[in-house]
Image (tube, helix red, strand yellow):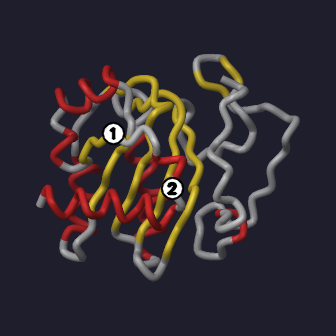
Amino acid sequence: MHEIEPYYNWRHLYTAEEDEYSPFFGREYSEFEFSNTVYNYYIHPQWDEFGSRTLYMKVLFVDYDLNYAIIELIGEWNDAVENDIMQLKRNVVDVMISKGLTKFILVSENVLNFHSSDDDYYEEWYDDIKDEGGWIAAINMPEQTQYDFRRSHIDRFVKLMDNPNWRTFQPQHFFQMVDNTMLRLH
């Protein structure tokens, strides 16, 4: 797992640590000191910790004019024990919403599994953004993780999509594809 890096080809366009509105503004990273783990396996130091011990993230791109964020996730999404959705909502999403963001793309191909609890924070997140035309989309979540999301009915709030070629697009084109799909779903 230590070799899985957050997607980096958009770093010339956006970095969360240089965005004064970002919850990760001012963070400094090491390329050599591995300290965070998932399942006792070290993960690459470029991943951001946000309060969970099992799920980490990287804000890949934000556009404050079009009000969207692209976030990549890695690890185990564990609401049952770690209450990861509360940590994500309170420590990251609420900050982003306060800056006007209403559309969230969660690149989830490295979310190894999901353990549900209640859906209150998902519903709150959705309620916070729906009147502004907002949405939440999880891209490329592994099949078993999708199954657990659906079984818990979280897919009422977080739409599950596949786009295996998302890395071949610039962020604005990737967003436009997801946004167009979300418009068709509503």
Image point (15%, 60%), residue name? 184
Q: Is 100 located above or below residue 139 in the figure?
A: below
Residue situated in front as seen by the camera: 44 or 84: 44
Please tell me whether residue 19 is drawn above or below residue 4 in the rendered image: below
Kindly identify the residue that appears in the image at 37 percent across and 33 percent down.
141
**Which residue does the image show at 50% across and 31% down from the upper left?**
110
Q: Residue furthest right?
A: 32
Give coordinates of residue 12: x percent, y percent.
72, 65
Q: Position of residue 21 (x, y in %)?
A: 59, 75
Judge whether 55 appears above or below 183 on screen.
Answer: above
Q: Earlier in the sequence, mark 2 or mark 1?
A: 1
- Label 2 close to label 1 by CB (< 8 Å): no
Q: Residue at x 48, y 57 (%)?
A: 70
Q: Is 121 in front, or is 160?
A: 160
The image position of residue 85, as x and y in percent, is 38, 44
Q: Nearer the viewer, mark 2 or mark 1?
A: 2
Residue 147 in the image: state x and y as whole percent: 24, 24
Q: Which residue is mark 1?
A: 162
Hey, which quadrant is residue 81 in on the image? top left
Q: Which mark is residue 169?
A: 2
Nearer-the-camera pick, 45 or 67: 67
Label 2, residues with CA under 10 Å away: few <14, some 14-19, many ≥20: few
Query: As drawn, which residue projects farthest toward the top?
Result: 40
- Distance between the alpha carbons at the discs numbered 2 and 1: 14 Å
